[in-house]
């Protein structure tokens, strides 16, 4: 029988990959997070995770899995689970449980676990090995999911986190131990207990222990294990990315007895030397380093890779206990940068420790160039900081470093720089652009929305110029046609919102007697009219789809047994570099309400061929049938059309109706009393209300019927 788990803190870097892995293993997964990252939430939902609309224990829950950031004694879901006799697991405990049917390659250590785990994944994929994996982070550019299950697999690669005291649950086939620092000891009571936990894991390892030869602590622990094969990772790599790659390749070759090759380019993990923006004589990076050893490794890396740059660090201490333990070491390594900014400490889930704050580090530092910035005025302070040496002849590297919320502040700062520069460029270009434009009327549900920049390029050439600007400044862009299936955020859409609305984008013509070419902005009703005027059948039932050709192809729009893709030959697209391409229909992998459009590509036009003819009487009767159907099935009011996709064995609207949700309202958003698969904006409904209503519907239907509803509506997360 299918097991249902409830995961608390589900959008965290450790929890989200486990949630995806469990969903792929056919667990029913409910999730809750007090501060859900919207982009991670979308990733989880796309993998079948059901977000709870309220903090409640699902009635069919078999167990609860909690992040270490969740206080089991204080949390209401955990309290409900205890009262109901439902077992509560920590993340590591359940990961160990679910991996027992696989040979486990465990990556452990104080630093570099996620990177080495990610390198192992990339190498095994490159060399065609079937395996499972669960890592503790996300690949750059979302190139791969953070977890994957294959029923054919014998092996699972997993990063094992020692910080929560759960490593005692794992019995790996092979263990890769990268390094040891006296960090995360709060769950062990003493250093001796902490070391014993590592030693016991070595003792439970089935075959090979890989250990970094330069780490004498771990090496001595490994050598105490009798009848174990010990392999030393003795690499004199120039920097930690090179070491991590060499270590991963060495271990995999030994385990599998192969001569695997590295991918031509390692993609890597987010927040490891991530380039945020390169502009004028500035380069901005962000990195997850949150321990003195990691910052020292980062300093070594940037010195080697950015010669001739001034090295400026903006550091946020992470956790009170770590700051109390290592404040002198933090100060010493920070003093080695050219300029230093320290910001307010991020305590995570730790309770206040008297006398511990960022001041411990800041006051210990000797640098005459050190600064302290309040997060409340972060953008303003960073602007002034950078302006001081903007005209300096030396190149400047600015690194935002830490494991707390420094990245969100850094992104806001970088975004402001990028948009300011974009506005300067707009004044030199002829593209029509507006800052902080009201774009509410561009969305069919009329949700209040504004765009940081709204642009209407008149030609493909202007569009290419616009995309080039976005790429050079690292600015996201989104296109909207009729906005029928799009839900913008309540706040500003922090992207260049592109509207293809000029006359050029609304033209179409017959290039042969049976071949019609349409630009992306042509409305569906106009497209259907042109086809039926020539007595061709096949799209006449799509006439009331409220969209344009570009959006209809992205969604593979359809109705009454017909779909936009049925008579499609090819599409023309423009990529993020401004290059034009033609893509044949068979390359688009059309599915129900979807198509595989290459990431970052914008549809410029499409070509169709028609063959089947019909009589005028047929078209006339079809129109009458559609009008009658619309009167009885299509609710009036501001809406998206159908919100959820139908399944192979169910109609979404029917399940929502059976769940008793017709008429359900949150704020000014409500389920239509006429058709349960429509959400109506009854007046100034917020995106937040609509999203919560969508979560509520998905939860109630899954909880009652075990059916997961996938939304047709797309969220703009910019």
Image: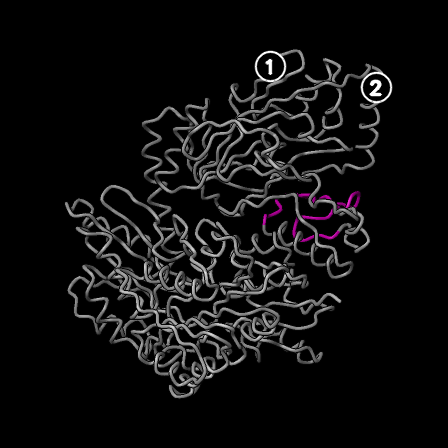
Q: Where is residue 422 shown, x and y percent of the image? A: 35, 36
In this picture, which residue range is highlighted in magenta?
Answer: 664-687
Helix, strand or loop for disc 2: helix
Helix, strand or loop for disc 1: strand
Distance between mark 1 and mark 2 Cα atoms: 24 Å
Mark 1 vs 2: CB contact within 8 A:
no
Q: Residue at x 68, y 25 (%)?
A: 567
What's the coloring here?
A: one colour
Q: Main secondary structure of the magenta part?
A: loop
Q: Where is residue 12 shown, x and y percent of the image? A: 51, 64
Q: Which one is in front, 607 or 446? A: 607
Q: Indicate whether residue 192 is drawn in magenta.
A: no
- Residue beneath disc 2: 618
Q: Is residue 281 left or right of residue 501?
A: left
Q: Please identify the quarter of the rendering in which residue 683 is found.
A: top right
Q: Residue at x 53, y 47 (%)?
A: 490
Q: Which one is in front, 624 or 295? A: 295
**Tag 2 or tag 1, which sits nearer the N-term?**
1
Q: Where is residue 191 shown, x and y percent of the image? A: 37, 86
- Residue beneath disc 1: 509
User: Relative to 134, does residue 639 appear above or below in the rendering?
Assistant: above
Q: Residue 219, which numbered label? A: none
Q: Is residue 83 visible?
A: yes
User: Relative to 543, does residue 199 appear above or below in the rendering?
Assistant: below
Which class describes the residues within 10 Å of circle 2: few (<14), some (14-19), or many (20+)? Answer: few
Q: Indicate whether residue 676 is drawn in magenta.
A: yes
Q: Please identify the quarter of the rendering in which residue 430 is found.
A: top left
User: Relative to 638, does residue 50 appear above or below in the rendering?
Assistant: below
Q: Is residue 373 visible?
A: no
- Determine the residue located farthest toward the top in the rendered image: 513
């Amino acid at each position: 029988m299918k097991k249902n788990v409830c995961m608390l803190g589900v959008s965290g870097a450790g929890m989200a990959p486990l949630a995806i892995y469990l969903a792929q293993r056919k667990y029913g997964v409910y999730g809750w997070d007090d501060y859900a990252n919207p982009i991670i939430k979308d990733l989880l939902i796309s993998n079948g995770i059901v977000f709870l609309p309220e903090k409640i224990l699902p009635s069919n829950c078999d167990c609860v899995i909690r992040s270490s950031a969740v206080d089991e004694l204080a949390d209401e879901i955990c309290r409900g689970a205890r009262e109901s006799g439902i077992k509560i697991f920590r993340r590591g405990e359940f990961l160990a449980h679910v991996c027992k049917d696989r040979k486990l390659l465990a990556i452990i250590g104080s630093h570099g676990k996620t990177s080495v785990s990610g390198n192992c994944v990339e190498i095994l994929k490159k060399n065609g090995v079937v395996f499972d994996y669960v890592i503790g982070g996300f690949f750059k550019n979302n190139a791969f999911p953070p977890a994957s299950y294959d029923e054919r697999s014998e092996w699972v690669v997993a990063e094992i986190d020692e910080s929560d005291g759960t490593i005692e649950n794992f019995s790996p086939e092979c263990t890769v131990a990268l390094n040891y620092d006296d960090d995360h000891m709060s769950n062990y009571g003493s250093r001796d207990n902490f070391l014993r936990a590592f030693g016991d894991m070595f003792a439970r390892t089935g075959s090979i222990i890989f250990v970094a030869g330069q780490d004498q602590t771990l090496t001595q622990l490994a050598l105490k294990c009798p009848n174990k094969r010990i392999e030393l990772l003795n690499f004199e790599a120039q920097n930690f990315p090179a070491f991590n790659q060499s270590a991963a390749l060495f271990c995999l070759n030994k385990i599998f007895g192969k001569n695997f090759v590295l991918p031509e380019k390692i993609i890597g993990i987010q927040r490891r030397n991530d380039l945020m923006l390169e502009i004028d004589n500035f380069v901005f990076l962000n990195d997850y380093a949150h321990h003195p050893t990691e910052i020292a490794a980062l300093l070594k890396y940037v010195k080697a890779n950015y010669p001739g740059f001034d090295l400026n660090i903006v550091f946020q201490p992470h956790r009170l206990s770590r700051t109390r333990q290592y404040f002198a070491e933090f100060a010493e390594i920070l003093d080695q940068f050219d300029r230093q900014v320290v910001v307010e400490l991020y305590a995570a889930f730790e309770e206040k420790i008297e006398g511990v704050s960022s001041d411990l580090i800041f006051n210990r530092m000797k640098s005459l160039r050190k600064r302290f910035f309040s997060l409340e005025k972060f953008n303003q302070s960073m602007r002034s900081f950078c302006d001081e040496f903007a005209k300096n002849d030396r190149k400047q590297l600015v690194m935002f470093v830490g494991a707390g919320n420094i990245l969100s502040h850094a992104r806001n700062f970088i975004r402001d720089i990028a948009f300011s520069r974009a506005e300067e460029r707009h004044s030199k270009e002829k593209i029509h652009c507006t800052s902080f434009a009201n774009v509410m009327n561009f969305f069919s549900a009329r949700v209040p929305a504004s765009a940081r920049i709204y642009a209407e390029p008149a030609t493909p050439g202007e569009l290419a110029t616009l995309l080039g600007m976005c790429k050079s400044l690292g600015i996201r862009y989104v296109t909207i046609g009729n906005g029928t299936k799009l839900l913008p955020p309540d706040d500003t859409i922090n992207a260049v919102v592109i509207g293809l609305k000029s006359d050029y984008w609304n033209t179409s013509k017959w290039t042969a007697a049976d071949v019609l070419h349409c630009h992306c902005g042509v409305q569906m009703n106009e497209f259907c009219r042109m086809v039926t005027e020539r007595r061709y059948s096949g799209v006449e039932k799509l006439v009331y789809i409220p969209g344009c050709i570009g959006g209809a192809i992205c969604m593979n729009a359809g109705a009454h047994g017909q779909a936009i893709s049925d008579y499609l030959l090819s599409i023309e697209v423009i990529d993020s570099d401004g290059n034009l391409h033609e893509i044949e229909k068979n390359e688009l992998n059309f599915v129900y309400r979807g198509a595989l459009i290459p990431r970052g590509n914008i549809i410029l036009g499409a070509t169709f061929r028609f063959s089947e003819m019909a009589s005028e009487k047929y078209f006339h009767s079809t129109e009458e049938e559609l009008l009658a159907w619309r009167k009885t099935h299509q609710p009036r009011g501001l809406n998206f059309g159908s919100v959820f996709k139908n399944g192979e064995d169910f109609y979404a609207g029917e399940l929502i109706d059976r769940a008793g949700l017709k008429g359900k309202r949150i704020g000014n958003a409500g389920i239509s009393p006429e058709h349960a698969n429509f959400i109506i904006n009854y007046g100034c409904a917020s995106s937040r209300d609509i999203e919560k209503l969508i979560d509520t519907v998905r939860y109630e239907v899954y909880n009652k019927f075990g059916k997961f509803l996938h939304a047709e509506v797309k969220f703009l997360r910019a």
